[in-house]
Image (cartoon, rainbow, N blue to C red):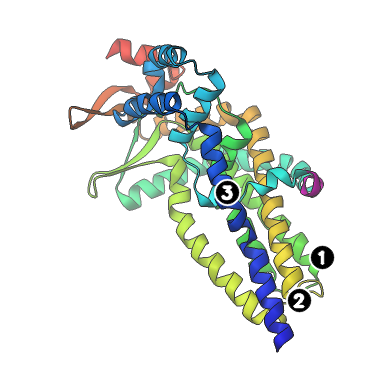
Amino acid sequence: MVDDFEAVLTSILILASPVFFALPVSFAWRWWVGIEPEHEHYREKVRRVLDSGMPLIRYRSELDAQARKVHLTSDRQARIESDLLHKLRLQHFLLFPSLILWPLVGIFAALITIPMMPLLRLLEWILIDKKVLSGVASIIQKYTRWEIIGIPRLDAGAKEFDKVLASIHRMPTTVFLGLFAYLIVSYFPMSSSRVLLMSALVYIILVSAISVIRAATESTLTFADPTNRTIMPMDSYVDEKLGPWVGVGLIFLLSRQLMYGSKIRTGELLIDPIPFSISVLIVLYTATIIGISVEIVFFRNRGNSVRRTFQSQMVEIFNPMVYLFNRHHGSLRLIPLMSLSEWVDSDENFEVAFRNH
């Protein structure tokens, strides 16, 4: 009994180690972004633009002039703007060790990422070319009675940040879904190697589908709920709906696995709680690297094409309007700019939008 208690306690400490690592990393991140007075001064300037609801591109020249005035490099500007636009929280810092462990888990990630490329193209064909995703959007709109509109993204015109770190911001829900799949599959009566193989297969399908959906919806498209007075960008809809359930499910499954692991796990490698806890961290960090690799490759090669195609499909079904959602002297306003078709035809050019308004 003592041995079992010690093993469970050790496994809990192993599973908690990313949290212990995340706390100092979060402080280091804050220092790396910038804590000097001139950094805070520029941060406040950017925050004022964002608080007004205006995309950064509208005041890009003024922000650059302000940065030159306080001697900020373009890289520092990118860090500060990214920190305001895509705030990293504890769940993001939990994934940071994957960047350190890249040489160890990168090989496993590569073995899984390479066969994912044909699957990505297949899912793109199903979801985009065959209009399945636009059909799902139509069902959501009819069921919820929401409106589909366009609101320019605030990060338009932001200084380009490191793509790996930008991808980590989108990763937690995807990665935790992969870990969720692993914990579910570990219940099956099969060997440890088959558990890992089946988990990898499930995760490949999940991350491929989510990557295509994110590429399609990372645009101006937004759900507007007049009844509840809410506006939700399409690209955050999946995270908003899945995130809480995945978090609760992970806590429940991990707790149950640690308490009753030897009774519900059959793989010889995973019966002992300590190897099982180590396998959870390996799956977590491998899933992070796979997700980052797939997103970067897919977004770079197919992102723009998928986004434009999906927006064109939304034009055919809904023909939504693009609005500027801003705040002026305490008043919130939705200002019509143009139709989404005109927005797409102008190549999402803000100068055209503001010139015509």
Q: Nearer the viewer, mark 3 or mark 1?
A: 3
Name the disc covering residue 24, or none. Answer: 3
Name the disc covering residue 97, or none. Answer: none
10 Å crowding of disc 1: few (<14), some (14-19), many (20+): few
Helix, strand or loop under label 3? helix
Which image quarter holds the C terminus? top left
Which residue is at 37% across, 12% downward? Answer: 352
Which residue is at 82% across, 46% downward? Answer: 107
The amino acid pointed to by label 1 is Ser
CA gap between label 2 and label 3 equals 30 Å
10 Å crowding of disc 2: few (<14), some (14-19), many (20+): some
The amino acid pointed to by label 2 is Asp
Vertical position of residue 175 compared to residue 167: above or below = below
Question: Relative to the observer, which residue lies in front, 349 or 88?
Answer: 88
CA gap between label 3 and label 1 equals 35 Å
Which image quarter holds the N terminus? bottom right
The stretch in magenta equals: 103-108
Image quarter for residue 45? top left
Q: Disc 2 marks which residue? A: 272
Q: Tell me which numbered mark, 3 or 1, is placed earlier along the sequence.
A: 3
Q: Nearer the viewer, mark 2 or mark 3?
A: 3
Image quarter for residue 324? top left
How many labels sit on residues? 3
Q: Nearer the viewer, mark 1 or mark 2?
A: 2
Q: Tell me which numbered mark, 2 or 3, is placed earlier along the sequence.
A: 3
Helix, strand or loop under label 1? helix
Helix, strand or loop under label 2? loop
Residue 99 visible to an observer of this rendering: yes
Q: Tell me which numbered mark, 1 or 2, is placed earlier along the sequence.
A: 1
Q: Disc 1 marks which residue? A: 193
Left or right: where does residue 97 sit relative to residue 127?
right
Question: Relative to the observer, which residue lies in front, 14 or 123?
Answer: 14
